[in-house]
Amino acid sequence: MKQWQKKVAAAMMAMATIGLIAGCGGGDKKAAADTIKIGANLEMTGNQASFGQSSANAIKLAVDEINKKGGLMGKQVSLQVGDNRSEAAEATTQMQKLIDDGAIATIAPDTSSNAIAASAINSSAKVLGISPTGSNPRVTWDDKANKVRDFMFRSTFVDSFQGKVMTSFALKQLNAQKIAILVDNSSDYSKGLAKFFEEAFTAAGGTVTGTEGFLQKDTDFKATLTKIIASDPDAIFVPAYYQEVGLIIKQAREMGYTKPILGSDGWDSAKLAEIAGAQNLNNTYFSNHYAVDENNKKAMDFVAAYEKAYGVKPDAYAALAYDAMYMIADAITRANSVEPEKIKDAMAKTENFEGVSGKMHIDERHDTIKGAYIMTYKDGALKFLSKVEP
């Protein structure tokens, strides 16, 4: 199939998924009164479509499981998905639409920039938003007002922890004393994580040989990589999303760079191997939220259910979205209420929640405290290497 035909087919599949999910629990006013509506504001199309589609599948799976067990407070759960097209402005529009349509809680966008943009709507409407993978601190913390965003949460760990995890791995496991950083200057996530990594790495005695930037949707990184490689690093750190990361890795290997390339949770997509090439991913490592091949019963049961439903193994975006939906269900159950304010208060008190991505609790900044996984590739296959606890 030609490349343009693949893109059209993928877009049509994504829109079909949105239509099917949005229809769950539909009906007349009486049916609406007998359901609990949850909204999901996701990157179903656009540059991060892989994230949104994985998340939507997992949320739908969780909702189906919840409804088969009797729903919440004696009511069935109705799921409505909005496509933010991987754009911050549209993320704001979709969040407003979901809340206007009656969502009493929402799953916020996967990407930090989109979640931060949409958070203004959650705050003004006083309706909870929980981002599966928005790991930038600003998703839950308003740095201008210097206070927590009361109605924003996350099911992922925060980037300051992720930076420390990759610092420890680089120094202790790879003995990489000199690292160059390649950052996406159009992404709050990438800029924030690059900053946290550099602070942790230099504080631990490492040296950053240079930092170069690029923008989302760039495709030619050779000039930038020439500068990075010329600084003679022991490894390159690329905290960015799979679309650009795949091209960066591919071009770096084509230029003869064989040393380690390190990254972050934004790498986690089956499309990374397609873009980079399987062999080029050898000697690459990134931090993640869970591992398909970890010996954990809860995770294994989720993997089996997801694979049965969709025919593929779930990535970390699916795992965190699944956890986010169950965290909302847990908060509603503990609150014994469908009032958004009470659901928010219950979510803020979450402790020892057992998700497929591990045990977690929410702190006073609404950050989720949990472990991280180090992942690697062997001939294009993703492999679990080790787990790091907070």
Image: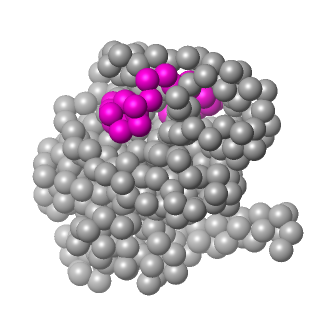
Q: Is residue 291 left or right of residue 4?
A: left
Where residue 321 sits in the image (x, y, percent)?
40, 58
Residue drawn 71% across the image and 29% down it: 225
Where residue 203 sits in the image (x, y, percent)?
33, 15
Q: In front: 253, or 350?
A: 253
Rendered position, 336 above or below 96: below
Residue 170 visible somewhere in the drawing:
yes
Q: In front: 349, or 198?
A: 198
Q: Is residue 96 left or right of residue 375?
A: right
Render colour scheme = one colour
Residue drawn 56% across the image and 52% down it: 282
Quadrant of the drawing holding the N terminus: bottom right
Where residue 285 sits in the image (x, y, percent)?
47, 46
Residue 166 colored in magenta in the image:
yes
Residue drawn 32% across the image and 19% down it: 204
Residue drawn 74% across the image and 26% down it: 226
Q: Is residue 249 left or right of residue 345?
A: right
Residue 113 visible somewhere in the drawing:
no
Q: In front: 50, or 382?
A: 382
* Quarter residue 244 falls in: top right
Residue 157 colored in magenta in the image:
no
Quadrant of the drawing holding the C terminus: top left
* Quarter residue 221 falls in: top right
Where residue 88 sits in the image (x, y, percent)?
60, 38
Magenta residues, start to end: 163-191
- The image shows a total of numbered marks equal to 0
Rendered position, 13 above or below 370: below
